[in-house]
Amino acid sequence: MTTDAQKNLLLEEFQHYLEHADLNPITGDEQPDLATLFGELAGLKNEVKTEARQFKNTLDTLSDALATVQRDNQAMAAELATYTERLQRHRHEVLRPILLDIVDLYDRLSAGLDVLQHYRPVSSLFKHSKQQDVRFITSFHQGQELTLKRFEQLLQRHRVYPIACIGKMLDPRTMNTVEIGRNTTLDNGIVLEELRKGFLFEDQVLRLAEVKVNKL
């Protein structure tokens, strides 16, 4: 079926023909009869139909090619998504044990830093070296803080973040109750203390937090 665009194109071609054709007055002897004129018009009509069919076949071919390209693109996108998901899953499997070891080292450094923060020099012992001991402990404390910050930065680069627990309602998906407390000023199920820090690896639990929960 001829579209409006095709009809307009044919009309423009016919108008161009009329504008550039030699239309000098024809003598009486040269005037064609009606049969000849109708024959020429019929031939022109057939040519137009032939060109229209060829144009339609070309459009159909291009449409089929476009549909094939779209199907190929969809298949490639689905394959890429599957590969990305598989790669992400493999990355998690490889990194998880390594990150757990790093988190364990982080715990030990945190415990050592907590001991240093609560250190108080004994006044009655080692008076002759007390100042040197205090300076050594202070320097060691600063070094431990710096090392601990570097561990935190390392974990953050791999999108590992601590789970916020204290003062929140117990979440069994991210927390594990290991102790029970009693605080009448707080609601039942509120986390009173964090006994071991928990961590999230991206959107998954890397390690459950061990907590002390309020129970009335």
Image (spheres, rainbow, N blue to C red):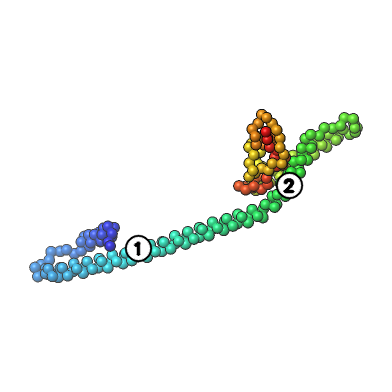
Q: Amino acid at mark 2?
A: Asp
Please identify the quadrant where the N terminus is shown: bottom left
Please identify the quadrant where the C terminus is shown: top right
Q: Is residue 197 visible?
A: no
Residue in the foreground of this view, choosing between 81 and 167 = 167
Mark 1 burial class by Cα count in 10 Å: few <14, some 14-19, many 20+:
few
Q: CA distance from mark 2 to mark 1?
A: 66 Å
On the image, the x and y values in percent for residue 78 come to 51, 58
Is there a contact, CB below 8 Å, between mark 2 and mark 1?
Answer: no
At 80% from the left and 39% from the top, the residue drawn is: 140
| Mark 2 or 1, nearer chain start | 1
**Left or right of residue 56: residue 174:** right
Query: Can you identify the residue that label 1 sits on?
Result: 59
Which image quadrant for residue 153? top right
Could you say whether the residue bearing mark 1 is in a helix, strand or loop?
helix
**Left or right of residue 45: residue 174:** right
On the image, the x and y values in percent for residue 76 come to 50, 60
Query: Can you identify the residue that label 2 sits on?
Result: 104
On the image, the x and y values in percent for residue 150 come to 71, 44
Residue in the foreground of this view, choosing between 31 and 89 = 89
